[in-house]
Image: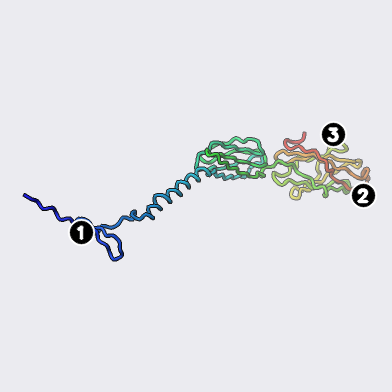
């Protein structure tokens, strides 16, 4: 017995535009896949992957850490806390922290680091990622008091046996109780301020009539001390204290940066 072959419905026909139209066995039109377009295939499988892969490689090779440094305020003018963060796409293999080229110890909490500094200067953080890229950040620290007070040389004068001068300190402030003078280099002949205007920093000292020089000693509130010499230009001071004598502060002054004068 012969069986008849089923009638096939797959066939191709040309549309008005000359495109090939595909139909399935049921005579329904089969839509063309977007990937059948060679230009789209080239874009999706060649051009875009090329840029994506090379972009990722470039990012990994050139990626460097990011550093942000914050210098905190000081309560005592002796020390200050410095906080810095290090963020990197790749792990950081080396981290160097220094102040004026001297290593500084630090603690870590995630990406945040904290350290304490006791001097002013240039604070430096240097981070190296595993790809060899290096990032360095610099910050200037100037909130600490490491400078002794200074005497305004132009303010020094003598009138009626009274030596007056102004002294100032821009950070921790002048320790007015530390001020004294040595007369004529005699360690046993010491004078102290007779009057102090703490708001203006104006110091008044009564000096002997035979004073030829006075070595001033003073410090600030954190112990930075300095000694400066004032020489009376008139030989002696009249007993009646009526004539005025000029005075000046010599440019050469001995300075002690820490600790009080003994």
Image quadrant assignment for residue 258: top right
Circle 2 crowding by C-alpha within 10 Å: few under 14, some 14–19, many from 20: few
SS at badge 3: loop
Expressed as whole percent of the image width and height from the top left, the position of residue 260 reads 74, 36
Would you say 222 lies left or right of 202 here? Answer: left
Expressed as whole percent of the image width and height from the top left, the position of residue 134 reads 57, 41
Q: Nearer the viewer, mark 1 or mark 2?
A: 1
Q: Nearer the viewer, residue 114 or 127?
A: 127
Circle 1 crowding by C-alpha within 10 Å: few under 14, some 14–19, many from 20: few
Q: Nearer the viewer, residue 79 or 97?
A: 97
Expressed as whole percent of the image width and height from the top left, the position of residue 215 reads 84, 39
Image quadrant assignment for residue 74: top right
Q: Which badge, 1 or 2, comes first in the chain's sequence?
A: 1
Residue at figure coordinates x 85%, y 40% from the top left: 214
SS at badge 1: loop
Expressed as whole percent of the image width and height from the top left, the position of residue 39 reads 39, 55
The mark found on residue 27 in the picture is 1
Residue, disc 2? 243
Residue, disc 3? 187
Circle 3 crowding by C-alpha within 10 Å: few under 14, some 14–19, many from 20: few
Would you say 164 lies left or right of 58 here? Answer: right
């Amino acid at each position: 017995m012969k069986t008849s072959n089923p009638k096939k419905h797959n066939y191709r026909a040309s549309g008005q535009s000359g495109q090939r139209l595909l139909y399935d066995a049921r005579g329904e039109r089969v839509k063309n896949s977007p990937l059948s377009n060679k230009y789209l295939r080239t874009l999706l499988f060649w051009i875009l992957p090329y840029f994506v892969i090379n972009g990722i490689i470039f990012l990994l090779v050139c990626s460097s850490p990011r550093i942000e440094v914050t210098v905190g305020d000081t309560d005592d003018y002796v020390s200050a806390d410095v906080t810095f963060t290090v963020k990197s796409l790749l792990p950081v293999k080396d981290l160097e922290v220094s102040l004026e080229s001297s290593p500084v110890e630090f603690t870590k909490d995630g990406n945040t680091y904290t350290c304490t500094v006791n001097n002013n200067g240039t604070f430096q953080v240097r981070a190296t990622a595993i790809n060899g890229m290096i990032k360095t950040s610099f910050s200037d620290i100037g909130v600490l008091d490491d400078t002794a007070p200074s005497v305004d040389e132009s303010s020094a004068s003598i009138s009626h046996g009274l030596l007056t001068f102004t002294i100032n300190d821009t950070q921790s402030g002048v320790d007015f109780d530390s001020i004294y003078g040595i007369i004529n280099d005699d360690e046993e002949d010491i004078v102290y301020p007779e009057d102090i205007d703490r708001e203006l920093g104006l110091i008044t000292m009564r000096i002997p009539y035979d004073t030829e020089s006075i070595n001033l000693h003073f410090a600030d509130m954190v112990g930075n001390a300095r000694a400066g010499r004032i020489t009376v230009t008139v030989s002696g001071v009249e007993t009646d204290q009526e004539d005025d004598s000029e005075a000046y502060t010599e440019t050469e002054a001995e300075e002690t940066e820490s600790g009080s004068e003994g």
